[in-house]
Image (tube, rainbow, N blue to C red):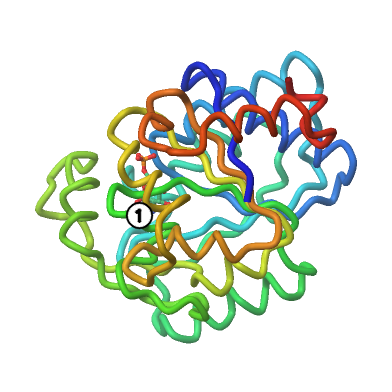
Amino acid sequence: MDVVIQPTADAACRLVARVIAGELRRKPHLVLGLATGATMEGVYRELVRLHREEQLDFSRCRTFNLDEYIGLTPADPNSYHRFMREHFFDPVNMDLRQTHLPDGCAADLDMECRRYEEAIRRAGGIDLQILGIGKAGHIGFNEPLSAFRSRTRVKALSPVTLKQNAPQFVDPSKMPRRAITMGVGTILDTSRCLLLATGAAKADIMARAVEGPITAMISATALQLHPRCSVVVDEDAAARLQGVAYYRWTFENEPEWEAFR
Ligand code: GLP
């Protein structure tokens, strides 16, 4: 794992977008794993800018989102289908047939989870997975005690998640209590991972996720086992990390980051 600290949330989002752009230019058929949440809006804004101003081409890109609420149709304003279309898919030249999110309205949810895993496998696996982090340390909707070998499945949302995400709903009491999410094992199988966290509210959980002991109580700690995972944070989210001097040296000196300094 490596940690990249950027001065501001904007700069952190731009760096993540530039990594995605770099991978996409190298491999136009990139299989990109995507995340939702307020943190990601800045990343998608920058990708849209790169598309409009620098002709970044998404036409051959294939995408798989981490998760979707159960019971929300794609048209629901709170669905992740809708979030993705609004913030990313519609403003760029993405082929919608190549975008994938779990269907939270499927009649047979277990079969939908198996179908999703199979679709990822048929695409050749995920080349680059983008991740946010919940306040209690979930990645996707892998709530506390998610098995590190778990695959895409239905997960009941924890009280912390219900509290964190309910304000986004027009009627918070209508927030679904379950979601379909890629498993921790699905995420660990991706070729490369980028976890983005910004703001002081994420400082505690980032210290535990990056430098704390590996535990199923905090699914983000599983990323310590991923062979190629980078964590991108702004100064606020980095505030409680112990090893910042080392992380800064690595970013300034490792050839892998040369194009991004
Ligand atoms: C939701 C998503 C997560 C995401 C989290 C962070 O819970 N299921 O994948 O990481 O939101 O949200 P925010 O960026 O708004 O803090």
**CB of residue at label 1: within 8 Å of ligand 1?**
no
Is the residue 5 above or below the residue 164 in the image? above
Quadrant of the image occupied by residue 256: top right
Is the residue 132 above or below the residue 41 in the image? below
Which residue is tagged 1?
A: 137
Q: Residue furthest right?
A: 26
Q: How many marks?
A: 1
Quadrant in which the C terminus appears: top right
Answer few, some or many: residues within 10 Å of disc 1's Cα (few below 14, many 20 plus, some between 14 and 19). Answer: many
Choose between 239 and 142: the one closer to the eye.
Answer: 239
Choose between 32 and 95: the one closer to the eye.
Answer: 32
Q: Position of residue 86 (x, y in %)?
A: 49, 34
Q: Position of residue 2 (x, y in %)?
A: 63, 44
Q: Residue furthest top?
A: 53
Q: Residue at x 33, y 38 (%)?
A: 202
Q: Is residue 35 visible?
A: yes
Q: Position of residue 156 (x, y in %)?
A: 26, 72
Looking at numbered disc 1 in the image, what kind of residue is underneath it?
A: Gly
Quadrant of the image occupied by residue 225: bottom right
Left or right of residue 94, residue 117 in this image: left
Q: Residue at x 27, y 68 (%)?
A: 178
Left or right of residue 156, residue 142 in this image: right
Q: Residue at x 66, y 18 (%)?
A: 49
Q: Residue at x 37, y 76 (%)?
A: 154
Q: Position of residue 123 (x, y in %)?
A: 77, 67
Q: Secondary structure at mark 1?
A: loop
Left or right of residue 164, residue 220 in this image: right
Q: Is residue 51 visible?
A: no
Is the residue 74 above or below the residue 215 in the image? above
